[in-house]
Image (cartoon, helix red, strand yellow):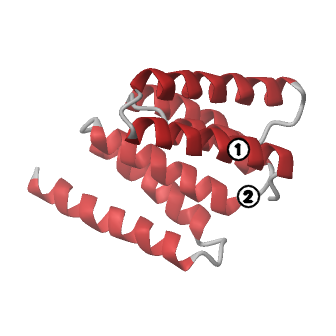
Amino acid sequence: MNIPADIHTRVVDLTNAMIDAGQSGDTEGAESLYAELSRYCESVAADGRDHPFLWETLADFTDDDRDAIAIYLRALPLASAADAAEYAASICLAVAERHSNLDEFDVARRYALQAEAFAHNTDDLPLRKIIGQFLQDHADAADER
């Protein structure tokens, strides 16, 4: 699934600026750039050019796990509708990780299994390995409970 060049460029510019602001200790600047990215995502979607890359990236830069999950879940149907298995796998893994952060291990495992199912339709071996490791790590966590 190709990302339109103008969208990719704008998102990368904003995220790089956010990272730079965060690394220099400019929390207010980073928050302002995050808000700008959020507005950009909404405007692109409103223009009929919605893309899972927008929402997955926004969620990646969202500190609150519950907020991030909601944003990832906005990206997932876009990826599924476009048969973009790599996006869908990556998004499901991110949702699983966020649920794991919240100690919601059963939900995390369900999303990780969805990620694994999507990933089997890709050639992305590193992603498949990360998902497998997540499942293994969380199977061990479940056994310890």
- Horizontally, residue 29 falls left or right of residue 139, namely right
Spatial CA span between label 2 and label 1: 9 Å
Image quarter for residue 137?
Answer: bottom left
In the displayed orientation, state which residue is furthest to the left: 144
State the image coordinates of residue 41 (x, y, percent, origin top left).
Answer: 72, 30
Residue in the foreground of this view, choosing between 30 and 41: 30
Could you tell me residue 6's position as x and y percent? 84, 45
> How many residues crowd mark 2 within 10 Å: few (<14), some (14–19), many (20+)?
some
Q: Residue at x 80, y 29 (%)?
A: 45
Q: Secondary structure at mark 2?
A: loop
1 over 30 or under it: above or below: below
Residue 4 in view in this figure: no
Residue at figure coordinates x 39%, y 28% from the top left: 64
Q: Is residue 107 left or right of residue 117?
A: left
Residue that mark 1 sits on: 52
Residue 130 position within the rendered picture, expressed as x and y whole percent measured from the top left: 42, 68
Q: Which mark is residue 74?
A: none
Task: Indicate left or right for 69 with 12 as reference.
Answer: left
Q: Earlier in the sequence, mark 2 or mark 1?
A: 1
Q: Residue at x 56, y 49 (%)?
A: 91
- Residue holding disc 2: 84
Badge 2 vs badge 1, beta-carbon distance below 8 Å: yes
Asked whether residue 55 appears in the rendered view, the answer is yes
Assign the N terminus to one quadrant of the image.
Answer: bottom right
Residue situated in front as seen by the camera: 85 or 58: 58
Q: Amino acid at mark 1?
A: Pro
Q: Residues within 10 Å of mark 1 (few under 14, many from 20)?
A: many
Q: Which of the pair 30/56 is nearer the observer?
A: 30
Q: Depth check: 88 or 145 in front?
A: 88
Q: How many numbered circles does the render carry?
A: 2
Q: Position of residue 85 (x, y in %)?
A: 68, 61
